[in-house]
Image (cartoon, rainbow, N blue to C red):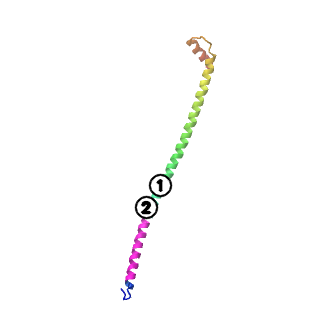
Amino acid sequence: MLPSGGPSHEEVIDDSKQTNDDLTEEISILREQVEVLTRKSEFLAAELERTSDQLIEATAWVQAESQKNNSAKEAIKCQMSQLKELAAKIPQGCSAEHQIRFLTCATF
């Protein structure tokens, strides 16, 4: 220490060197953290893309199944309507055998 009470030139250099070493170590740690976070980010981006693709495929499948379902409902509704029309044409009082024959002949 100098007689004036201030730090010596060597002490200032030592303090600066220690500060520099501390900052260099901190930079190294931060760089490692950046690398780790970059890898995590890349992994999550790939995972998000894969999940998005799966969602698109699932949505397309659901839409196709919904269309099939609606077509099937429409076909059933049409057949029920045709059956009701045929049932209305069956003469009253016919036996079950005659009703079956009538329906068979009416559909061909």
Q: Is residue 74 left or right of residue 43?
A: right
Amino acid marked by disc 2: Val
Q: Residue at x 61, y 16 (%)?
A: 105
Residue nearest the viewer, comparing 4 with 77:
4
Quarter of the image with the C terminus is top right
Residue nearest the viewer, comparing 76 with 9:
9
Q: Is residue 100 above or below residue 12?
A: above
Q: Is residue 96 left or right of residue 39?
A: right
Q: Which residues are magenta?
A: 11-32
Q: Is residue 39 above or below residue 71?
A: below
Q: Is residue 108 at least partly visible in the picture?
A: no
Q: Residue at x 49, y 49 (%)?
A: 51
Q: Secondary structure at mark 1?
A: helix
Q: Position of residue 78 (x, y in %)?
A: 61, 27
Q: Secondary structure at mark 2?
A: helix
Q: Residue at x 59, y 24 (%)?
A: 80
Which residue is label 2 attached to?
A: 36
Assess whether residue 15 is covered by the magenta stretch: yes
Which residue is label 1 attached to?
A: 44
Q: Is residue 52 left or right of residue 74?
A: left
